[in-house]
Image (tube, rainbow, N blue to C red):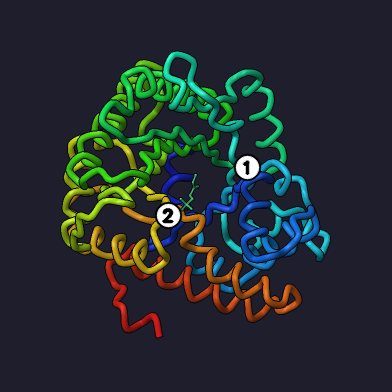
Amino acid sequence: MSELNGIALKILSNGKGILAADESTATMTKRLASVNVESDEKNRLIFRETLFSSRSMKECIGGVILYDETIKQKASNGKTIPELIEYNGGITGIKVDTGAKDLAGSIEEKITEGLDGLRERLKNYYNLGARFTKWRGVYIISDNYPSKLSISSNAHALARYAALVQETRMVPIIEPEVLMDGNHSAKTCFNKTSEVIKKCFEELYLNKVDLSGIILKPNMVLPGASSKEKISNDEIAELTLDCLKNSVPGEVPGIAFLSGGQTEIEATANLNKINQKNNTNFIMTYSYGRALQQSALKFWSKNVNNISGTQKIFDHRAKMCTLAAQGKWSENLEN
Ligand code: 13P
C-alpha cells in the first residue's frame, strides 16, 4: 500500500466520513447571517472548535476539511486546530482552490482558480499539518450546459491541482460538483455527471496522478431541485451507482459524496441506500458540509455558550451518517 493510499483509506474506512468545514469567510458569513450570528473570527472559531472537539470525532469523522483561516487558528486549550483534529483521531485537510470565477468564453459558467503559486502554498499547508486537500469544480445543468469548454477546463485544473498535491505527499480530493439547481430530470443529471467525471479521469491520467491516492467527491444523481420529477431513494442509489461504476476507474479507493443542498435526512437516506446496493469495490461515504452542520448551527445560534448541547446535535448527525455509510441507518433511529 502506498503512503497516499494509506491516508485515503484511514480517512474513509469503517464507516468514517469527512466533515467539510472549509466554507470560505464569505460563505461562512452567509451561513452565520442566516441564523443571526455575527461572522467574526472568534465566532467562526467557536463554532468550528465545538464541532472538532465533539465525541463523534473519534468514532465517525476520519478527516476534516479546513479553510485557510482555520488551519492557522488555535483552540481554547492552546493546541493548534490541526493538533486538536489529530488528537481526536482525524486527519486534517485543507481547501486549496481560490474559488470559482466566471469562465471567459462561456460567461454563465465557472472555472475554479488557484493554480498559480499552488506548489508553495501546499508546502506551507503540509507544514501546518494537512495531509489531504480539496479543490471543487462546479458545473451547471441546462439545455446547453455544462459546455464542453467548462467540462474540459475544470477537468484540466483539477488534474493539475491533483498532480501538485501528490508531489507534496498529500491526498487530493477531486470534487466535480454538478449542481442541483434547475428543473432537469435525474436522467439528465446522470448523463452530465457521467460526462464530467469521465473527463476528469482522462485528465488525471494524462497528468500521471496515482489514482489509488485520491478521493473522488461527486454529487449524487438527483432530479433538479425545481424539477417536478419525484424519484425514490432506491432509484437515486441505482442511478448514482450506475453512473460511478461506468465512469470511475477501479484503482480509486473511495468516493465521498457532497450533500449539495439535500436536507440532512435526504443526504443520509440516499447514502444509506447507496451502501445497501453497493455492488462496486469502492468505499462509499460522506464528505458533507451542510448535511452535517445545519441543525448544530441552528441550535448553537440560539445560545452560543451551549457547547455541549450543540455537540450532542452534531454527534447525532455524524452517527447517522456513519451508519448510512455502512448501510445500517433507518429513519426510526432519527428519534
Ligand atoms: P455540502 O455537503 O454542503 O454540499 O458541502 C460539501 C462541500 O465541501 C462543497 O464543496
Label annotation for residue 30: none
Of residues 5 and 180, which is closer to you in this image?
180
Q: Residue visible at 45% across and 72% down?
A: 319
Of residues 160 and 230, which is closer to you in this image?
230
Answer with mark 1 or mark 2, whichever residue precedes in sequence: 1
> Residue pushed farthest top?
105
At mark 1, the secondary structure is loop
| Separation of marks 1 and 2 at Cα, in angstroms | 27 Å
Of residues 333 and 130, which is closer to you in this image?
333
Judge whether residue 281 can be spotted in this image. Answer: yes
Asked if marks 1 and 2 touch (Cβ < 8 Å), the reply is: no
Q: Tell me the residue that label 2 is attached to.
A: 261
Judge whether residue 248 can be spotted in this image. Answer: no
Q: Residue visible at 42% across and 51% down?
A: 260
| Amino acid at dot 1 | Ala
- x, y percent for residue 14: 38, 62
Label annotation for residue 130: 1
Does the numbered disc 2 mark a residue whose Cβ is under 8 Å from ligand 1? yes
At mark 2, the secondary structure is loop
Of residues 99 and 124, which is closer to you in this image?
99
Q: Residue visible at 18% across and 49% down?
A: 239
| 149 vs 92: above or below | above
| Amino acid at dot 2 | Gly
Q: Residue visible at 49% across and 76% down?
A: 316
Q: Badge 2: few (under 14), some or many (20 or more) residues near its Cα, within 10 Å?
A: some
| 22 vs 277: above or below | above
Q: Badge 1: few (under 14), some or many (20 or more) residues near its Cα, within 10 Å?
A: many
- x, y percent for residue 263: 41, 63
Image quarter (top left, top right, bottom left or bottom right) of the N terminus? top left
